[in-house]
Structure formats: structure tokens, C-alpha cells
Image (spheres, grey):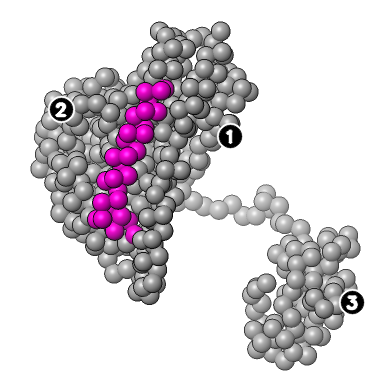
Amino acid sequence: MEFTLLLDPHSPLPYYQQIYAALRQKILAGQIAPRQRLPSTRALARSLGVARATVTQSYDQLLSEGYLQTVVGSGTYVGDHLPEILLHAPGAEPVPSESLPPLTLSSYGQRLAEVDAGPSLEPQTPISFRYGRPALDQVPLGIWRQLLSRHCRRADWLDYATDPMGYGPLREAIATYLTQTRAVQCHSDQILITNGTQQALSLATQILVSPGDTVALEEPSYLSARRIFASQGANLHPISVDGEGLDVDTLARLTDPIRLVYVTPSHQFPTGAVLSLPRRLALLAWAQQQGALILEDDYDSEYRYGGRPIPALQGLGSGQSVLYLGTFSKVLFPSLRIGYMVLPPSLVPIFSRAKWLADRQVPTLEQAVLADFIAEGHLERHIRRMRSLYDQRRQTMVTAWQTHFGDCATILGENAGLHMMVRFQTTIPDAELIARAEQVGVGLISAAPQYLGDSPGHEFIFSFTELDEGAIATGIETLASLFQ
């Protein structure tokens, strides 16, 4: 094992006593565990720059006191059973937190402490309808592995990237992809590569929203986005959603100045509504008139199962009032953690600076692999294949709802994306329904946390992408038994 010991040449204690004291403290603090092997006296002496005899003298003292034990032919180890008195030696017990001086948080830290920003717990059940997961067993890992191997032969990936905006070929590939598939109007210079949508939202909020500014967002809306806005000190104003998406007329009637509007127009989260073209045009006109900015989160627009897709908001206007957000987590795999923003040209310099200060760059190797994956046509083929598979699973889920629930379940947003929302006609409280479902091996995700205001209840989010058709049908049939 390796660990750090600091020797003080100006200390009145000789080196062997300093080594002894440092090792003893690490053992008592649990930093070196029982039965853990220590470096040989020769290796430790070399790393510390002292004579081997010095380390040997330290080890001998620890051996005599029972902290260490030797195994012939194997080495020196921390004692298996330390005497009880040693475990209660001074410095071995942690300092009680109430005796520590209070830490002062910044205003941002205080707001963050008040925001429920912990990760959402997901059901650990045989059948889980958790949302946001693609079919990971369908990812073309063989192709990805080949591309990764190709780039691993190059040593230049080992240094820092020079451009915080991201790897140039990837930005060019994304610009071409968005122009062809989403009618986004952009040049590669406008694209910022981010560590997923979360970082894109965080950067946009830090740069564009001051404490006290008003952010309008759909009701219900993406919980993580709401948490980010709240942590910045924004006033949140929910705007109702219907079958055509965000109610722009309600937004236009607000008297308070709106700094930012957050929308998911292609597949509203979580209701699945698609923002109609008239409303898209009205939202763009309103934003231009009010001098407001629009955050367009196009998180799963690749999947539409009927009708022609409506162009992105960003491509319908001048692009000066819209920041377009996208991610590869939904089309490839979540751990890739690569997202992107299409920025108005005037905002590129400040976002570049913010990204540099935040974390310098997204790992370049992964960016290079993804750039080739897109440029060589693998992404388009994968999306086309997954669209067909997801459509089959979607139809299986819709049929199962109709068969087992009939009019007792209203399906919303099933014609696009990776999930649908279902509203049950029942008097069973949500918490009780979730508990009952868990008992029979089915995991449910309530839509209630996505509401800023009061939730109507009995609404749940069901993904149809991760589970195969058999598991989908079985899960819904099992749920039906809970309502009988």
C-alpha cells in the first residue's frame, strides 16, 4: 500500500520517533486498517529518504507495543486484534460535531442547504418503471470499443484541451446533426460541450440569473432544473401545461418581469405534451418583446412515434433569445455524461470563461470517440434501430393499460420520448400505492415531486425503454391486481 508520511527536519524528535508517531496515529484513526500490509522497511525508507535502520527502529517499537505483527515470508501487518486500551488512546476517537466551531456558509451555500437537492431514490424491484434510462443492453459497445481503441493509441489526449468550449470535431459533428435533424440554426462555434444537462442548466443559471430574478417554468416541470434555479435564489413562477404544452397566454399575462423561461417543448417533462407550433411562435415573439431568454431542453427529441416533428424553438426564430440544451445520455448511455448547449453568439465568450473556471473541459478522449461515432453514421443508425424497438415496447405498454385498466387509467404523452405519464382513477393514496406495488415487485415513480405547487395526485411516470415487452406486460398486469 502507499500512504504519505511527512517528516519535519526541524523537529526536536528524531526521524524514527516521527515515523513511529505518524504510523501509530494512522492506525488509531482507522486510516490503516487491521490486517493491512505495510510497506517493507526498505521501500518506506526509500520513499522517505531516510536510512533503512531508522524505519526498522520505528517498526520494532510498534511491534513491541502490539500495533504491528509480522508474518514470516509475507511482511509486516497492522495487528489483527489491537488491545482495547489502544483503541481508546488519545486521538483515536472522532471529535464530536457539537464541539466543533460552526461553519459559516455563503449566501449560495445557505440557499443550497435549504433546497432538497439529494438524488432521487429509485425502486430496487424486479420490475422498475424508472424513467430516463435507454436500453443499455442495445448499446453498440463493439463499435464504441473499436473507436476508443483507435484513439487510445494517441498520446496527445493526455494533456489539457486548449478550448473549454469542447473538442472541435465533436462540435462540428453536433452542429451538422442538429441542422439536419432538429432544424437548429447554428455554427460549431456556438456549441459548448458540457458534463451533461445538469451542468448546462447550472452554468446558464449562474451566468444569467441573479438572486431575486423570476424564472418561469412549466407546471409540472423537471425537478432538478427547479432545484438549480432555487439554489441561485430565483423566484419560481409555475405556468400551467395542457395538451399543447406551456400555456403561453398565461405567461404573457404576467406583470412581473421574467428573466428566463425553462421549457421542454418536444416532450414536456413529465406530461409528454408537445408544444404546438402556434404556441412556439407565440413564445418566441413574447420573449423578443420582453427581452427574456428561453432555455429549451430538448432532452429526448430523437424519439417520435407518429406525425412529423416540429422544429426546435431555436430554429424557428433568430436564435438570439434561445439557449438550446441537448444530451447523449438518452440515446447512448447515462454514464457518458456528455451534453451540449447551442448559445447565442453574444453569450459564447462568457460561457467559455465560465466553463474554463468550472472544470476546464469534458474529457477529450470520450469527446473524440463520440465525434467519430456521429461522423461515421453510427449514431443515426443506432437511433433508427432504437426508435423501432422503443415503438414496439411503447405499443405493448399502451395495449396493457387498455387491457387491464380501461378507463381507470388515462395515458398522457405516449407518442414521443422515452416515457409516458399515467393518471389513475383511484382513491388509494400515492404512498400506499407505491408501497403495495413494491411488495409485489413493481417499482413506481410518482409525478408529484415534479410539481412546484400542489400535485393532483395519482399520476405516475412509466418508462417503456429499459424493460422488454414481457416485463412491461407483466408489470402492468401485476399493478392491475392492486386496484381490485
Badge 2, how many Cα within 10 Å: few under 14, some, many 20+?
some
Q: What kind of residue is marked 2?
A: Leu
Q: Residue at x 32, y 24 (%)?
A: 413
Given this view, does label 3 or label 1 mark the residue nearer the observer?
Answer: 1
Q: Which residue is mark 2?
A: 277
Q: Between disc 3 and disc 2, whose residue precedes? A: 3
Disc 2/disc 1 C-alpha distance (Å): 40 Å
213 or 463, which lies in front?
463
377 inside magenta stretch: yes
In percent of the image, x 29 and y 45: which residue is there? Answer: 381
Residue 421 location, x and y as percent? 39, 23
Q: What residue is shown at x 49% (from left), y 51% (from top)?
A: 105
Identify the magenta region: 369-397
The residue pinned by badge 3 equals 64
Q: Quadrant of residue 267?
A: top left
The residue at 40%/46% (across/down) is 139
**Residue 30 in picture, x, y percent from top left:** 73, 62
The spot of residue 164 in percent (x, y) is 29, 63
Cβ atoms at labels 2 and 1 below 8 Å apart: no
Q: Foreground: 254 or 307?
A: 307
Q: Earlier in the sequence, mark 3 or mark 1?
A: 3
How would you rate the neighbour count of disc 1 (Cα within 10 Å): few for under 14, some for 14-19, many for 20 or more?
A: few
Q: Looking at the rendering, in which quadrant would you find the C terminus?
A: top right
